[in-house]
Image: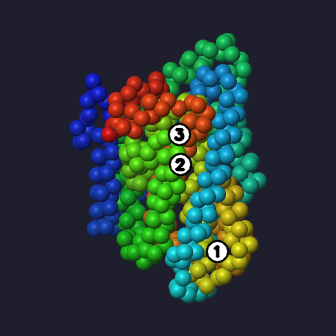
Amino acid sequence: MGPIRAEHGQRQPFWRLLYFWVLIGIIAGVAVGAFWPAFGASLQPLGEGFINLVKMIIPPVIFLTVVTGIAGSRQLAALGRVVAKAFAYFLFFSTLALIVGLVVAHVVQPGAGMHVDPSTLNAAAVHGYEEKAHETSVTGFLLSIIPTTLVSAFTSGSILQILFVAVLFGVSLALVGEPARAVTDMLERVALVVFRLVTIVMWAAPVGAFGAMAFTIGKYGLGSLLSLGALVGTFYLTALIFVLGVLGAVAALNGFSILKLIRYLKAELLLVLGTSSSEAALPALIQKMERAGCDKEVVGVVVPTGYSFNLDGTNIYMTLAALFIAQATGVQLTLGEQIALLGVAMLSSKGAAGVTGSGFITLAATLAIVPKVPIAGMALILGVDRFMSECRSLTNFMGNAVATIVVARWEGALDGDRLARALNGVPDELPAAAAVESDPD
């Protein structure tokens, strides 16, 4: 994604860098939404259109990356190890994120003192989310992994279905061996074209970020953010502590700096911030991780699965928001009920993979396990949920970037020199499928 590096490693002028224009788009969107709210709210199609544009290229990016990575490795045992290590990482840190949200909610108690009467809340405002909550059931989740046809995986919008088909196809190519080499070579050439398409599409990011931010500020207003500032501020601070503290410690133990990784991914982070969608930066994250020395097979498995199973920001949000509602409505939860919330939140966050508005929907599914916490209490945070969605997406994105590097290192599939050069902004040769880099630093 982004501009091609100038010859001989020279940096591009700042005004030719994509992240600069994304930042301009965000600032302009905030201004339009604040001063002309009606007009800003009408710009929603710009943001949604860009996200749909990105979603259009996600299926081929995931499919080609995973298939060529598995087929090229010829080591199916290695694939099993990568999957096992990735899921061990996801389970541990997803659980830790839930616990962090729970602990912070008890310490800060952002909802204490509000004394909200549940009967005065607008339950109709969250009725639609209650209906969608059944989509996050474990049974529904398992069924959603398997597509009805080979082609439907690419039209369903489900990352898990695409990944399922890609893994099967890649394993099949590896098992066939040399006779299938021509197919693998063809897919690698197609990947070159698709990643060039990614570069073209990403230049629409400033317009998408502008429209999405103008809509958010125009529709919900800065006032709605201030009215529940305690919850929003607590959530942002908790997410920041998790990224810099927890993920920062993980990064340090694995030989890299979280701050340098943030700087390396600054363009993608701005894109996520502007669109409130971590999916908007998924293709670019795949490119960036390969460029940073992570093996293609590891990237192809960890990044797509992480988008469904490694949702640190969403997990922090769910426990923090659940306890905020309980505190605001005067509900006292026992330790057993809080543990039940943790368990259901862990399952429902996985079941919501690919479900639109998953953060709010999984919250509804989680609250349903403790009947004495009124689901209608979700109306309290409905107005500011959009503001918190940016933080959820940013935290999820950074969690997956760190996970990719860590799993690659555990697997012995990380080029430390290339990682150091990438994080330090030193020019490097790019992988064939990622011949165009994002903004250099």
Q: Residue at x 58, y 53 (%)?
A: 311
For image coordinates 44% across by 48% down, the residue present is 258
Examine the rendering and report whether any part of residue 269 can be seen.
yes
> Are there few (<14), some (14-19), or many (20+) residues within 10 Å of tag 3?
many
Quadrant in which the C terminus is drawn: top left
Callouts 1 and 2 close, C-beta under 8 Å: no
Task: Pick whichever of labels 3 and 2 is earlier in the sequence.
Answer: 2
Label 1 secondary element: helix
Number of marks drawn = 3
Name the residue: 67% across, 12% down. 179
Q: Amino acid at mark 3?
A: Ile
Q: Amino acid at mark 1?
A: Ile
Residue 221 position, x and y percent, is 38, 70
Sequence order check, earlier mark of 1 and 3: 1
Foreground mark, 1 or 2, reads 2
Disc 3/disc 2 C-alpha distance (Å) = 10 Å
Which residue corresponds to mark 3? 405
